[in-house]
Amino acid sequence: MRVKSSLPEIDAQIEKLRERRKFLIVKAGERFARAATKAGLVEMEIPDEELDAICEEIAARFRKAEKGNAGSPAAATDRSGARSVGATAKGHHE
């Protein structure tokens, strides 16, 4: 049988989870910043509204791909679409 947790223990767990969440958000931001830099987006003057719309389109594309390939093991590893986007942008800056 499980031992009941005290309120201070629960508060400590909540604080650890908040710290972990902040860490994951920072890491995700760094990941996307690297991708944007590598693609040359940092050097472009793209309005925030347009950049937001572009990101939403990309997210929708990948959500659609996840739903369509949910049972396929290749769905988790196939990132050919992501590479082609970077390759296209990279070609313009070389």
Image: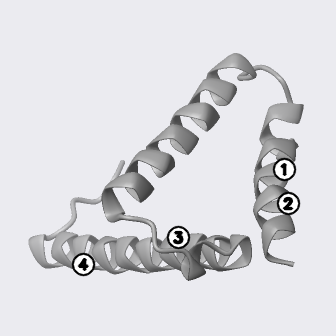
Closer to us: mark 4 or mark 1?
A: 1
Q: Is residue 86 above or below residue 58?
A: below
How many numbered discs? 4
Query: Do the CB atoms of the residues marked 1 and 2 lie less than 8 Å apart?
Result: yes
Could you tell me which secondary element the residue under label 3 belongs to?
Answer: helix
Quickly name the residue at label 3: 28
First along the sequence among labels 4 and 2: 4
The structure residue drawn at horizontal position 22% and vertical position 59%, both measured from the top left corner, is: 4
Locate residue 46, reporting x and y percent.
45, 66
Closer to us: mark 2 or mark 3?
A: 2
The structure residue drawn at horizontal position 34% and vertical position 71%, both measured from the top left corner, is: 17
First along the sequence among labels 4 and 1: 4
Locate residue 32, reporting x and y percent.
57, 70
Quickly name the residue at label 4: 15
Under mark 3, the amino acid is Ala
In the rendered structure, the answer to whether residue 15 lies left or right of residue 27 reads left
Marks 4 and 3, Cα distance to the nearest angstrom?
A: 20 Å
Quickly name the residue at label 1: 84
Badge 3 density bin: few <14, some 14–19, many ≥20, Cα 10 Å: few
Locate residue 94, reporting x and y percent.
87, 78
Query: Do the CB atoms of the residues marked 4 and 2 lie less than 8 Å apart?
Result: no
Query: Do the CB atoms of the residues marked 2 and 3 lie less than 8 Å apart?
Result: no
Quickly name the residue at label 2: 87
From the viewer's side, name the closer residue of 30 and 57. 57
Closer to us: mark 4 or mark 3?
A: 3
The quadrant in which residue 77 appears is top right
Under mark 1, the amino acid is Ser
Marks 1 and 2, Cα distance to the nearest angstrom?
A: 5 Å
Closer to us: mark 4 or mark 2?
A: 2
Marks 4 and 2, Cα distance to the nearest angstrom?
A: 41 Å
